[in-house]
Amino acid sequence: MRKQRIGILALQGAFIEHQQALQRLDAEPVLVRLPEQLQGLQGLIIPGGESTTISRLMVESGLFDSIGKLALERFPILGTCAGMIILGREKPPQSVKTLRAMDIETTRNAFGRQVDSFETDLAIPVLGQKLFHAIFIRSPVIDTLGTGVEVLAHLPDGTPVAARQDRLLATAFHPELTQDLRFHRYFLSIISEQG
Ligand code: GLN
């Protein structure tokens, strides 16, 4: 079987870790910095980092429009942390130009300065019974979501932190920073569901 060619937006942020996760799953990661590098890909990962910077560099490189177009065509995209902000809509007052491809409204840096990073074990039923160790770093949360959006994981207080809408996937945490490959494997399985 041919390896799945998956793009990773490599303008800023934690893209190397996604590259390693995909290699370990025997997929072919492709670092994307220019619109033409989106050719021939089966999916795309928008990594964590600084959403304002990633968004600005996406606009400057022409990738903002190209990725926005792909998202409308049901192209599979996984957004982690800053990537999740970029996939959805930011709650006003908005500071980041986002794709608005996913029907979620997010708040940036939702946990405030006191607890800007934390780790917790989450139940994510689509990944199986074993809890998933989730690392949150100055993370956003999902405030509101549309009817077509399925919550995949939430914090004990009910705050959604991972969601799926058709072939779009978003996590407020960083699955690429653990050795647990189940989230990436889940993304690859969504890609191979395509007819
Ligand atoms: N706080 C960052 C932002 O708002 C996201 C942090 C991250 O991706 N780890 O863009």
Image: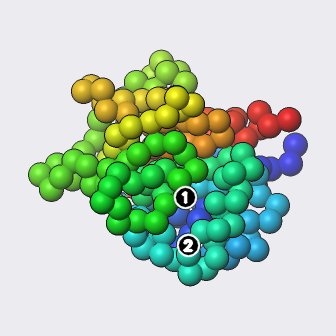
* Residue 51 position (above or below residue 74): below
Q: Earlier in the sequence, mark 1 or mark 2?
A: 2
Q: Is residue 23 visible?
A: no
* Residue 66 position (above or below residue 46): below
Picture quarter with the N terminus: top right
> Tag 1: Cα neighbours inside 10 Å, few (<14), some, or many (≥20)?
many
Q: Going 52% across and 63% down the picture, which residue do you hit?
A: 15
Corner quadrant of residue 85:
bottom left
Corner quadrant of residue 120:
top left
Q: Nearer the viewer, residue 47 or 68?
A: 68
Q: Nearer the viewer, residue 105 or 18?
A: 105
Q: Going 18% across and 52% down the picture, which residue do you hit?
A: 112
* SS state under label 2: helix
* Residue 159 position (above or below residue 60): above
What separation in Å lies between label 1 and label 2 (alpha carbons)? Answer: 10 Å
Whether disc 1's CB lies below 8 Å from ligand 1 is answered no
Q: Going 56% across and 42% down the picture, which residue do you hit?
A: 169
Q: Is residue 102 visible?
A: yes
Report the residue marked by disc 2: 58
Q: Amino acid at mark 1?
A: Leu
* Picture coordinates of residue 167, whole percent (x, y): 66, 40
In the image, farthest residue toward the top = 129
Q: Going 67% across and 52% down the picture, which residue do you hit?
A: 71
* Picture coordinates of residue 117, whole percent (x, y): 24, 51
Whether disc 2's CB lies below 8 Å from ligand 1 is answered no
Q: Amino acid at mark 2?
A: Met
Q: Nearer the viewer, residue 156 or 56?
A: 56
Picture quarter with the C terminus: top right
In the rendered structure, the answer to whether residue 45 lies left or right of residue 123 reads right
Report the residue marked by disc 1: 99
In the image, farthest residue toward the bottom = 60
Disc on res. 141 = none
